[in-house]
């Protein structure tokens, strides 16, 4: 009798571990007629934090399942670096554009700054808090995704533990859909009442994300300055360049995670 109970308990535990450790696409109903999806990576054994990752451009990574496999756009710095978060004890949740921004260029700057985006991501944060209770949640954006992380960080207040802004879109831009708008040119970073970390490549050549704008904030906020990496394989505002920390992903994420977990971190990666 004892053996049977033990076997059942072991099987139940094994089933729970298998299910809870599997990566998945999570789709939540948010606004009327709208859903918000995110990719929940396989969590580490002892998660220390959750990183909600906001890719750049229009934030459209086209999460989907094909023949039993999860597919999405792989090139963005935060997307391709997800395993670097996981192996350091951080759960990675990658945000896609909501269902009403799945066509065209994805989310506009104005949408990222607005109340509807907050409604969508509030559902995500609530879902993650239920899945991983008492685990601090951080908002992490890169390039145009920093608009989301900053604006949402201000709205969430103490509901999140901190905000990380990488290759911050400090300046207004113009271009194709999903790549134009005010950026964070009019944003007051002082409205974010939780800790903020800036991370920027010294040789970022994108005109709307100059390193100098990040350096000017160093008296108010911690800044991780990144040097070196691989030669660019894309345009200066695209992911496979210094703008996307190409060749420096592991070292850069290491300092981000150290900051999240209140460990000593280096303010220079070279």
Image: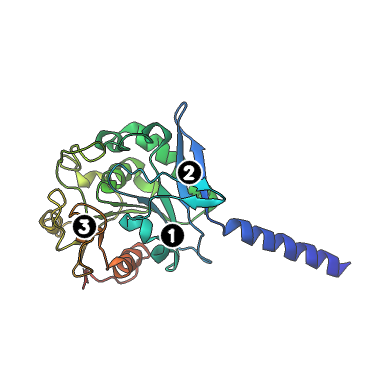
Q: Is residue 173 left or right of residue 1?
A: left
**Residue highlighted by disc 3:** 243
Give the mark count: 3
Element carrying mark 1: strand
Element carrying mark 3: helix
Residue 54 location, x and y as percent?
34, 49
Where residue 22 sits, quadrant-wise, is bottom right
Inter-mark Cα distance, 2 to 1: 15 Å
Residue extending farthest front: 67
Which residue shows up at 21% across the image and 57% down it? 243
Q: Is residue 168 left or right of residue 76?
A: left
Disc 2: CA contacts within 10 A as few (<14), some (14-19) or many (>=20): few
Which residue shows up at 33% across the image and 49% down it? 55
Q: Nearer the viewer, residue 106 or 123?
A: 106
Which residue shows up at 89% across the image and 66% down it? 1
Marking on residue 49: 1
Element carrying mark 2: helix
Disc 1: CA contacts within 10 A as few (<14), some (14-19) or many (>=20): many
Residue 258 location, x and y as percent?
34, 68
Q: Is residue 99 left or right of residue 180?
A: right
Where residue 154 sits, quadrant-wise, is top left
Disc 3: CA contacts within 10 A as few (<14), some (14-19) or many (>=20): many
**Residue highlighted by disc 2:** 126
Which residue shows up at 40% across the image and 44% down it? 96
Q: Nearer the viewer, residue 25 or 169?
A: 25
Residue 138 location, x and y as percent?
37, 54
| Mark in front: 1 vs 3 | 3
Above/below status of 135 relative to 63: below
């Amino acid at each position: 009798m004892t053996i049977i109970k033990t076997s059942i308990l072991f099987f139940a535990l094994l089933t729970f571990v298998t299910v809870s450790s599997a990566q998945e696409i999570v789709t939540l109903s948010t606004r009327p007629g709208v859903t918000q999806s995110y990719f929940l990576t396989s969590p580490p054994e002892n998660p220390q934090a959750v990183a909600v990752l906001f890719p750049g451009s229009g934030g459209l990574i086209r999460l989907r399942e094909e023949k039993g496999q999860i597919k999405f756009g792989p090139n963005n710095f935060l997307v391709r670096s997800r395993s670097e978060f996981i192996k350091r004890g951080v759960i990675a949740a990658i945000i896609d554009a909501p269902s009403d921004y799945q066509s065209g260029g994805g989310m506009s700057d104005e949408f990222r700054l607005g109340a509807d985006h907050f409604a969508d991501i509030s559902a995500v944060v609530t879902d993650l808090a239920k899945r991983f209770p008492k685990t601090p949640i951080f908002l992490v954006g890169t390039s145009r995704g920093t608009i989301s992380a900053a604006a949402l960080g201000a709205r969430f207040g103490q509901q999140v533990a901190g905000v990380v802004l990488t290759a911050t879109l400090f300046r207004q831009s113009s271009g194709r859909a999903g790549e134009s708008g005010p950026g964070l040119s009019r944003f007051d970073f002082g409205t974010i009442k939780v800790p903020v970390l800036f991370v920027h490549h010294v040789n970022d050549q994108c005109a709307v994300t100059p390193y100098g704008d990040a350096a000017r904030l160093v008296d108010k906020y911690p800044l991780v300055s990144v040097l070196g990496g691989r030669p660019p394989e894309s345009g200066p505002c695209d992911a496979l360049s210094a703008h996307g920390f190409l060749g420096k992903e592991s070292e850069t994420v290491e300092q981000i995670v150290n900051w999240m977990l209140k460990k000593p971190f280096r303010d220079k990666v070279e």
